Amino acid sequence: MLDLPSDCGEGGSRDEFVHLLVGAAERGSNTAMWMIAQLRLVSMTSDIREDVRNGAVHTIFRILDSCGDRMSEKIWDAYIRSVLLPMLENHSRVLPKFQDLHELTSMEPTLKVILQGLNGTFATSFETLAALPAFEEIWGTLLVHLKAFLHSGAYSVNKAVFDSVAQMLTSFEGKDKIGQRPVRDALELWIQSIPVPTETMTATNANDDALVAYVKLLQPICRLLSEHIEAQDILTIMRNLGLCIELSVAASYGSDIDTTTKLQNVVLQGFGNLRTDFKGVPLAMIAQLAAFTVLPYKQQNNHQNPKQCSFVAFAKKAMKLLEITLAKHAENKEVYNTKGYLAAVFALNISVRGKYQVEPQGKAPALWLQAASTAVSIVEKTTPFIQDFQLDEPRLNDIWSATLELFDAIAHATLPVSLNNLDIISDESFDIQALQKLCSIMNPCLASDRISSKVLDSYLASLFTNSLIHAPHTSELPSLPGDQLLKDLYKVRFGRTSDSPFNRRIRVSYICLDELFSLAMTHEQHSGERLEVHSDHLNPGHGKLAQMALPYLVLRCALPLKSYIADQPLRGRMPTPQSQRLELLHILGKIKTLRCDPSRLASQGNGGSQTVNSGHIKISDSSRRHLEWLAPLVNRALGEAGRDVEVRDALRSVMDIVIGVL
């Protein structure tokens, strides 16, 4: 057993300790002579010659490896304080003085040898080290010196230090006698040592390797802290993880459009492993993940940094984690009372709005499609809690306003000319399913008397706008949303012979049109029919929404009738364009079967009874009251009907109903 002579005390300075060792060696102590040899090796570890200093470091750790199991606790303590820590101190003191990158690079091999030696020592002798009375003090001093290594500015050194500390921390696991102080010291080192590019070292691909090692170090720290981690720790960790993504750079070869980078993967894993059972933490995580989802769109505007990542694949994975996080904390009222939920929906809405307009979108599913799918899932999972929490009206209206913006973003699309029909049909089918799901969720909630008229108007205006199959003339449309929707109901534009282009997403237009009809129906009619959009989620109290929907519906039905009245005389024997013809037939069929509750006919100053009186029509059947608005236009269209028997019969059948209920 190697042990120091009793007269070589542990106290005093290093010079005093050396003096005592020399005296013991003169008296014939082999251990003292062995120790003096180690002290002389320490001075050689900072030699200007690389081979000399590397050889000295190798020798120190080789001797320690062969003799460590025979060293007493006293000599271990002396060895660490007099050999290992001074060796680290010599280098940590010298590194900041290097201004030349070449000089710094020349020291890297020695630093890596030192770190490898420390790893081996902790791996083979951790039980002995942990039993030292001054272990926490020694560990803290060790981290101070390693922190100086990290501030050297060399990314490869940073990577080596992070890897080394992570490997040393694995020795802590399963050791109950190790307190939380050493692990918390490691966390402080992690928080303060993010490898930010310096003036001499700009962001390069090598920085990403250092960042990966930095993020991986977080894993053993969080495992060891476990139940002792605090909310402020987690908030700081999330901030640093977000900064890691900001500091990342694009790979020299390859792209992160279709697959995430290694750094992006470990950052998301880091978020996924964090505890979120602290007040304020779920909101911060939702906000950070929401910010990740819009990174591809920020990059579109960042033309000054061509090495910036695209973040497309990363944003898709962040959306999935955002959905999981919101679902996990759906029962937390704080998520809705603050801007956590709104931040998520707004961020996803940006992605959905970018469809067909922002490139790249990555491999399937496209970025906008992933955002739409995630947003609908979030709305579906959170709506029951939003309803149960009885949020204050301003917050409730903000939530539904954001949801309606999402609805409009899904329904709307500006199609590039180059987009082929197969892609349009596929994307449209997805959007239809999403819209149907949103309608089934939203409509019962929007029936609440706590929802403002402004929110309902925005919903109806969105349905109206997205239901347009053919673009109307500007004179035919009032300002939307507005109070004077039916002011110019009977004002017909000049006729034209050119065919109006139709919306290539025609199925979405019909879905929105049918939803307008559905909202205006009586509850009795709802109960007797299977509606395509939301028959399973009816609410008999949706009178206000239906009341406000009726003017939009009447205006929407009037548009194809007025186009027919204006253009048909100019066509002669030319047939009506098929898209316009089918739209007209669809609307005529719908208005024949529609039943509306007269109590829902609000007097909004939008031309209701005042306009009807000008047509000299008064319908006795209150459930057919919508025909009072439309009958004058239907009658004029019938007068212009040409040789199209089907259209003429459809117009006549509507007038027959009007005559029958006068």
Image (spheres, rainbow, N blue to C red):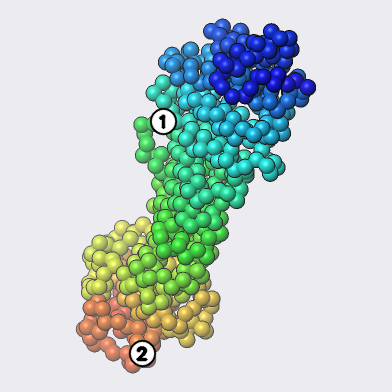
Q: Name the residue under label 1.
A: 306
Q: Position of residue 414 (x, y in %)?
A: 39, 52
Task: Describe residue 3's horizontal placement relative to residue 337 as left or right.
Answer: right
Q: How far apart are marks 1 and 2 (CA)?
A: 66 Å
Q: Nearer the viewer, residue 214 or 310?
A: 214
Q: In which quarter of the image is the C terminus?
A: bottom left
Q: Position of residue 365 (x, y in %)?
A: 54, 49
Q: Where is residue 421 in the image (x, y as percent from the top left)?
A: 49, 51
Identity, as a three-letter code, of the amino acid under mark 1: Pro
At horizontal 62% and vertical 42% (from top left) the residue drawn is 179
Give the structural element (helix, strand or loop) at label 2: helix
Q: Where is residue 432 in the image (x, y as percent from the top left)?
A: 50, 62
Task: Describe residue 514's horizontal placement relative to residue 323 as left or right.
Answer: left
Tag in front: 1 or 2: 1
Give the structural element (helix, strand or loop) at label 1: loop
Q: Which of 610 and 651 is in front in this view?
A: 610
Q: Quadrant of the N terminus?
A: top right
Identity, as a three-letter code, of the amino acid under mark 2: Ser
Q: Can residue 219 be seen in this view?
A: no
Sooner in the amino-acid sequence: mark 1 or mark 2: 1
Q: Name the residue under label 2.
A: 622
Count of labels in the image: 2
At horizontal 41% and vertical 73% (from top left) the residue drawn is 446
Disc 1 residue crowd, few under 14, some 14–19, many 20+, Cα 10 Å: few
Q: Which of 513 and 43 is in front in this view?
A: 43
At horizontal 56% and vertical 51% (from top left) the residue drawn is 275
**Position above or below: 142 against 111:** below
**Position above or below: 30 against 472:** above
At horizontal 56% and vertical 36% (from top left) the residue drawn is 186
